[in-house]
Amino acid sequence: MKLRTLFRLALAGVIVLFVAAFVWWALKPGELPQTPQSITKAKGGTAPNPTTQVINLGEYLARMGDCVACHTEPGGKPFAGGRAMATPFGNLYVPNITPDEETGIGKWTADEFYRMMHTGIGRDGTLLYPAMPFASYTKVTRADSDAIFAYIQSVPPVKLKNRPHELRFPFNKRELLVGWRTLYFKEGEFKPDPKQSAQWNRGAYLVDGLGHCAMCHTAINVLGGSKEAQAFEGGMIPNQNWYAPSLTSNREAGLGEWSTRDIVDLLQVGVSLRATVYGPMAEVVYNSLQYMTDEDAEAMAIYLRTLAPKDSSPPVPSSARLVQPAVMETGRQIYEKQCAICHRTDGKGWAPMYPPLADNQSITMASPVNSIRMVLNGGYPPGTRKNPRPHGMPPFAHLLNDEQAAAVVTYIRVAWNNTGTPVTTAQVNELRRMLPE
Amino acid sequence: MLRTLAFLAGLAVSLCAWSQDEAVPAFKSIDSVEARVQGCVTCHGQSGQGTENGYFPRIAGKPAAYLYNQLIAFRDGTRKYPPMNYLVAYLPDPYLKEMAQHFASLRPAFAAKEQPNVDAAVVERGKAIATTGDPSRGIPPCIACHGAGLTGMEPGIPGLVGLRAAYITAQLTRWRVGDRRAADPDCMKRIATRLSETDVAAVSAWLAMQDPPKDASPESSNLVRMPLSCGSQR
């Protein structure tokens, strides 16, 4: 009898425990994104002290935020600023963020640094121009902000005075930023989605936060703002004349139908079986994404895939029939002579060295800007740790006139059942005139 | 198998084309330096011999360290030519060195030399500057550093033979106005700023008319005493 009671009690206890565990599991908040342990290890392999761990972490996170790309002048000292950033409103000169006490941020505190990252307000209370991606950095956790700050304080200080911005009236009036902030800025750290995996949340944290992907992949309007409702829907990058494709549409650079492996390769290696990065995205891979851990690259890939749900609408028919036969033939002949050695007659390329053009979203997407630019200027993918000797494409601007370039771009956009549309000589001419020469 | 066949077929076609047009992309093996430098060929030719376009220079056979210095300068923006700055912007040092060594090792035939449409007096003036210099203005002769055969000198001085007048004029002019520079002490800057515009035109015309020597290799390093100290020779 006594034994039976004990047994029942024990059974009840176990059930209660199970229920409690289930309730906890079901209701627990999403896990905060964790930085992989491997990053905080010392370079020598010995057990690192806590300071080293934080600085290593900060260095990694600063790379994820790609701070160096804007805050360093080409050929200049890292983080010393001075780089001119052309905007539709005039030139901005990026400030010195080395720990120099007079000209850099040597006198800042971690609190002030976090306030700047989180709210876009400088140490002295000035409102920052949104060229600083604080609308994304606001999602960065306090701990990560502190680590970045610790790393920045550990780099060599450089004495270099900030150059004043050269913005046109009225954009030189910082008071106007109050209006901009009301319209386009939403303050707040990243909130993990408990319905998603820890991996997905880590990816979202990186893409939406430090990665500041939205700076290019969300269209910028005349006020230099990007609407949250149009997040990652793509747009022209002002002053660079490249098109940043949509990440939410599988007709553009949406990755919904890609394998995780191919996305990881594209971001971390710079080339993949499906596509290759050039132009501004090559810069991002070169300065930032190639240094990602495999875990983080996979997390990003998993999140990016969910931005573009699988498309169930029927495929667009080829526009080949809309192209004049003579134009198609001109395009085909140029393709066979100049392009087929690398991209092959069937358009399948020799991936990942030479990307496929058949069934490649970046060739068929609505905007032909990037395809035209590649034909005119050629390009090399970034040399990365996993692909230090990339294969490159030569420029053809000096060999093809506008009609010929338009014909060959039209050809690759409609051949092999590609779903692109024809391009005009005017489109080629416009991009040719914008190019630096 | 089909893939291999298709590749070989494509290769055969392209090899035929190769001999006809040095500016058309072509390579034998995809995992080779040749395949990797296809980004260069429509302007500089398959073997770096230059193309019909007068501006794009011959790069074959120039000293590897010179070519490497230029690639680094284009990448970092210290030498400005937007199409080149764009192409090499995100390439790491060892890869640029490999490209430089590749083109430095090639000795393709020279294109037919130019016959610039200039007066005999101008050519004489150009010859005088190139071969004897102008001591009264502190201008040493080109051949003192760029070699008797104008094939350059290891490690940092480029050959001038096989370059077109338009390219040489553009470079000397950029040096005169401070757009192009080399490692300090910048000997070429000292010289270019002493040349007048007519000197530049004359010396460019004469240089473009010269026949290449049998061996187009650069001279060995510092066999001769150079008239000025040059940072790129250190």
Image: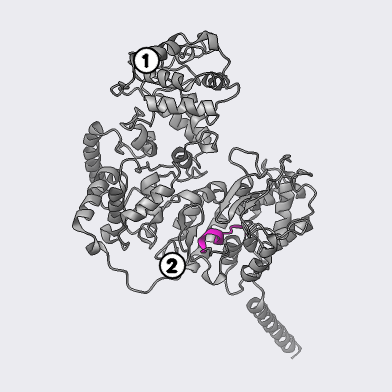
Label 2 resides on the chain identified as A
Instruction: Answer with the quarter of the image where residue A249 lies.
Output: bottom left
Which residue is more in the foreground, B136 or A176?
Answer: B136
Total numbered labels placed on residues in the image? 2
Give, as a three-letter code, the residue at label 1.
Val
Residue A347 in view (yes/no): no
Label 1 resides on the chain identified as B
Question: Magenta part of the protein: which range?
Answer: A210-219
Q: Secondary structure at mark 1?
A: helix
The percent position of residue A261, horizontal first and vertical second, equals: 46, 57
Which residue is more in the foreground, A97 or B90?
Answer: A97
Task: Calculate the distance from the C-alpha at mark 2 to the C-alpha at mark 1.
Answer: 63 Å
Is residue A215 within the magenta segment? yes
Is residue B189 within the magenta segment? no
Residue A19 tag number: none
Q: Which residue is mark 2?
A: A249
Nearer to us: label 2 or label 1: 1
Q: Secondary structure at mark 2?
A: loop
Q: Which residue is mark 1?
A: B123
Q: Residue at x 63, y 63 (%)?
A: A135
Asked whether the residues under marks 2 and 1 belong to the same chain, the reply is: no
Q: Residue at x 29, y 33 (%)?
A: B22
Residue A390 in view (yes/no): yes
Q: Residues within 10 Å of mark 2 (few under 14, many from 20)?
A: many
Which residue is more in the foreground, A79 or B180?
Answer: B180
Callouts 2 and 1 close, C-beta under 8 Å: no
Give, as a three-letter code, the residue at label 2.
Ser
